[in-house]
Image: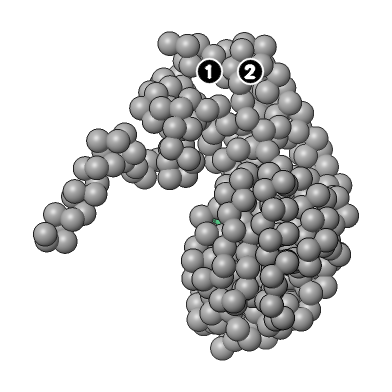
Amino acid sequence: MSLSARWTEALDGLKAQGRFRSLTPPRGIDFTSNDYLGYGHWTAAVPAAPEAAAGTAAVQFSGTASRLLRGHPVWAEVEAELAAWHGAESALMMTSGFVANEGLLSTVVEPGDWVASDERNHASVAEGLRVCRPRRFVFRHNDLGHLEDGLRAEAAERPPGRELFVVTESLFSMDGDRAPLPEVVGLAERYGARVIVDEAHSTGCFGPTGSGVVDDLGLRPRVLATVHTGGKALGVTGAYVCGSRLLRDFLVNRCRHLIFTTALPPAVGAWWLDVLPRVKADAAGRVSLHANAARFRAALAERGVPALGDAYVVPVVLGDDARAVRVAGRLQELGYDIRAIRPPSVPPGTARLRISVHADHPPELLDRLAAHLAEAVRA
Ligand SMILES: *Cc1c(COP(=O)(O)O)cnc(C)c1O
């Protein structure tokens, strides 16, 4: 079979299953992006360079090289701000959350180690674990009993030198629910495992200064590392790993995803410095975000439309792929940008709408959407 025939066959298979995807431009009011706090619209001019930069302006749009070959002073400033925000020893910027997860896991976890991973963890976690090939235990979503079964069995036969890890998201991107983090951390401690938390969807949105769920629950000293992206609520690009100074040194020396890739542009660093104080101060945005989520969820419940989870990611499971596409299409006709989420992003038979409530959605708009959604689901 020729290469083009192989690809055509694969794509035809997806089309037959109603799973063919394409990249499409925005098509209405944004209920689909992860711009939870509405910062995605910010277009302020990139602020001037921190003067420390030796002759290189922070507005520069080229990273020019790996950070190890030619760094830029803006990143030390950004990382100091981030570490202080989280009350962590260190932060290390990476080019994206996907890269940060894959880089962190593939550097820290060695082939003889054992990793328990929630079945709904992001693809970048799965990818990191695929690369480092540990012994893997995928536990049922947020199922503490199942996690403990795995930990108990593993801890009983643990040879010296084998490390145990537990990886979970704090707020799950496709289910809109939170991991029972205090319990997960407690179990990990009982069996000598280290915890890594992906805070992609909670960064900016939880805690008095928005630093995330781990900090809000006071769990920082009890986790090995957290991963945060700027690409969601923070309205910027890039991501970072928070942890000990030793972890940072280890990553700087070993993480191929940092060493062998061009640094983010200094202009992006300047944007982080601009964004961070605004995020920390935006308690009002967080209040609106959670209030909007509660209002929208109540409006759906009133109309008999069940939704998963309890946060601003509001998944309405429709089951069948074609049905999800049809209902999303109807809502798009009505002016809402809402898209069907299908396998492999979610398990087969659980295709869904994933409505992303934002802090700046007017409450009446949320009510109107709930009414339209209830109609579209019943049609
Ligand atoms: C989006 C996402 C990532 C990847 O972050 P990017 O900065 O977009 O690459 C990682 N983990 C989770 C849970 C995500 O939702």
Three-letter code, disc 2: Leu
Cα separation, mark 2 vs mark 1, equals: 8 Å
Q: Is residue 236 above or below residue 322?
A: below
Image x and y of residue 171, in percent:
68, 45
> Is 29 left or right of 184, judged from the image as shown?
left
- Residue with the mark numbered 1: 373
Q: Secondary structure at mark 1?
A: helix
Q: Is the C-beta of the residue carrying label 2 under 8 Å from the nearest atom of ligand 1?
A: no
Within-10-Å neighbours for mark 2: few <14, some 14–19, many 20+: many
Q: Residue furthest bottom?
A: 69
- Which one is in front, 31 or 61? 31
Circles 2 and 1: CB atoms closer than 8 Å: yes
Residue 77 horizontal/vertical position (percent): 75, 73
Check residue 231 in the rendering and tell me which mark sits there, or answer none.
none
x then y, percent, for residue 156: 73, 66
**At 62% across and 11% down in the image, what residue appears?**
303
Question: Quick check: which quadrant has ligand 1?
Answer: bottom right
